[in-house]
Image (spheres, rainbow, N blue to C red):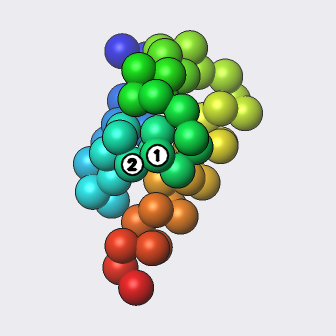
Amino acid sequence: MTEQEKYLRDLMQKNQVSQSEIAEHEGISEQAVNQQLLRLTPSKVKHLKAIIIELSKQKNC
C-alpha cells in the first residue's frame, strides 16, 4: 500500500465514508473505486479527498 492510498483509506475511516458511498457518488462501481485507489495520481488523490470530505459533510448535516 502506498502512502497516498494509506492516507486516503485512513481519511475514509476517520470520516466514516465507504468505498461504496464514493462509488455511488461518482456513478461508478465499487471495483472502479478500488482500482483508482491502487493507481493513484496526485490529481486522483485530490479528487478522492474532496469526495470523502463532501460525503462526510453531507452525513453530519
Real-space CA distance between mark 1 and mark 2, rounded to the nearest whole angstrom = 5 Å
Could you tell me which secondary element the residue under label 2 belongs to?
helix
Q: Which mark is residue 56?
A: none
Marks 1 and 2 in Cβ contact (< 8 Å):
yes
Taking the spot 65% from the left edge, 32% from the top edge, the residue there is 44
Q: Is residue 38 above or below residue 59?
A: above
Q: Position of residue 17 (x, y in %)?
A: 34, 53
Q: Is residue 5 visible?
A: no
Left or right of residue 36: residue 3: left
Q: Is residue 49 above or below residue 55?
A: above
Q: Is residue 3 above or below residue 23?
A: above
Q: Position of residue 56 (x, y in %)?
A: 41, 66
Q: Which residue is mark 1?
A: 24
Taking the spot 46% from the left edge, 62% from the top edge, the residue there is 55
Q: Nearer the viewer, residue 18 or 15?
A: 18
Q: Nearer the viewer, residue 3 or 43?
A: 43
Q: Which residue is mark 2?
A: 21
- Report the residue that reaches farthest toward the right: 43
Q: Nearer the viewer, residue 24 or 13?
A: 24
Taking the spot 60% from the left edge, 35% from the top edge, the residue there is 45
Residue 14, by quadrant, is: bottom left
Q: Residues within 10 Å of mark 2 (few under 14, many from 20)?
A: some
Q: Amino acid at mark 2?
A: Glu
Q: Amino acid at mark 1?
A: Glu
